[in-house]
Image (cartoon, rainbow, N blue to C red):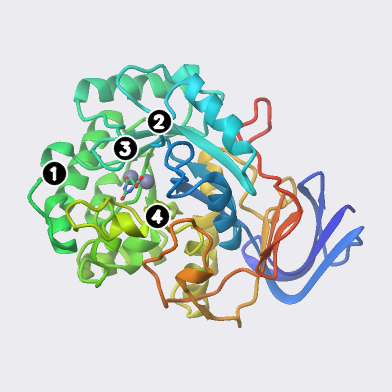
Amino acid sequence: METVVEGRAFYQGDLIECCIGIEGGKIVSIKKVLKGEKHYNYSSKLILPAAIDAHVHFRDPGLTHKEDFQTGTIAAAFGGVSCVFDMPNTLPPAISSETIKEKLDSVTKKAWIDFGLFGGCVSSFKPESIANMVIGYKLFMSSTTGVLLVPDDQSLTKIMTSVSKTGKVIGVHAEDERMIRKLPEKNLLDHDRNRPIEAEISAIEKLVSNFSENRVHICHISSTRSLKSIRGTKFTTEVTPHHLLLDNTCELGAFGKVNPPLRNRNERELLFEAFIRGKFDIIASDHAPHTIEEKEDDFDIAPCGMPGVETTVPLMLNLVRRDLIDLKTFTKCACERPAEIFGLLKGKIEVGFDGDLIVVDHKKIERIKAENLHSKCGWTAFDNYEAIFPRALFVRGMLVMEDRSIVGERIGRNVVVKGEKSQH
Ligand code: DOR
Ligand code: ZN
Ligand code: ZN
């Protein structure tokens, strides 16, 4: 066997002591004893599937003063993430075969972990022309960072119809532009008031009434009331760590300004309850870095979004340690479902799947500190939160991070490869 990783692995719903044999990047055998040319023995440490963060903004190209594909993927690796899906609101936006090809050429050279790119939806575009290059499509129903916005019903219908022909998933930023107020904002409460939960519900209801048969993925759901309006559809659902753990009374100033906004404490608690009861398909960071300088501007002017790709897994692992979240719920939402929804053989310790693994020492509890993180933006809204950072990350059987250092080669690749066998 090329590579064997030994430890207490999460396999078919249980933790078992075993050896995971990997060849050509794929898991080929899981047995009590295996011999490998390279043999990593982690004894009693946990071996879990690496996470897939299906929602990041790595700002490359065009906004690389905030993040680039190298810093973004390194931050992901330290956070136990073996694969990210990058959003299209870059400069230029990733909306045509030319812009996406250029983006692919440039970011592939900088990727330390695997990735897929979302293609952005605009009124005048042909989804089929980029179908073989993208992991899925992204549609913004309201204005937020960037220029991509599809507020009118006619364009929405046209896009939904043409995207459905590609068979790919369409991720939606669901806030109803018409219900967003533009009143001056001084704090997170004002921001929540300007972009209320009702705007999210209204956008989701429009999608449910008109496109319930489409492969719609609702990004960053911020309220259980929105979640309820999705019941009975085929839509898939996403929640972020910030909507689960932070609320609009946190003293973060504009550093807590995100879209959709942080809600009140009660809403947050209900959301957390729904998450631990397995009501969401996936957890994703919506890693949206902006510089400290930009965030220190007047509240009204500061851009929306916060980083998170490096802290999602560590925060969740700590909640697992505290018995607040089931290990099963965590691996389902952070690993299995993102892979299933987007059709990848990743996210599971199982024969035939990519050898994407993390090594976790549950006794090693740390506190999140901005200066120890790797995003270019240099700050976090989770400063001082308890977390369990993975000790190692394997991507397709290759060590990328070990003992909190990046090791080996830069091996990240685009997961959208023509002819590759997928879960669909
Ligand atoms: O807060 C947000 N920031 N929400 C978004 O939808 C976009 C993101 C960004 O790109 O900064
Ligand atoms: Zn969004
Ligand atoms: Zn986003």
Task: Say which mark, if any, is on residue 93.
Answer: 2
Q: Is residue 124 left or right of residue 13?
A: left
Q: Amino acid at mark 2?
A: Pro
| In the image, residue 386 above or below residue 188 | below
Q: Are marks 3 and 1 in contact (CB under 8 Å)?
A: no
Q: Which residue is mark 4?
A: 280
Nearer the observer: mark 1 or 2; the answer is 2
Estimate the x, y position of residue 404 in percent, counting from the top left.
65, 69
Q: Find the distance from the CA under tag 2 to the CA under tag 4.
A: 29 Å
Kind of element beneath mark 4: loop
| In the image, residue 383 above or below residue 328 | below
Q: Is residue 319 left or right of residue 381?
A: right
Q: Amino acid at mark 1?
A: Ile
Q: Which residue is mark 3?
A: 146
Image-quadrant location for residue 155: top left
Q: Earlier in the sequence, mark 1 or mark 2?
A: 2
Q: Are marks 4 and 3 in contact (CB under 8 Å)?
A: no
Q: Find the distance from the CA under tag 4 to the CA under tag 3.
A: 27 Å
Q: Amino acid at mark 4?
A: Phe
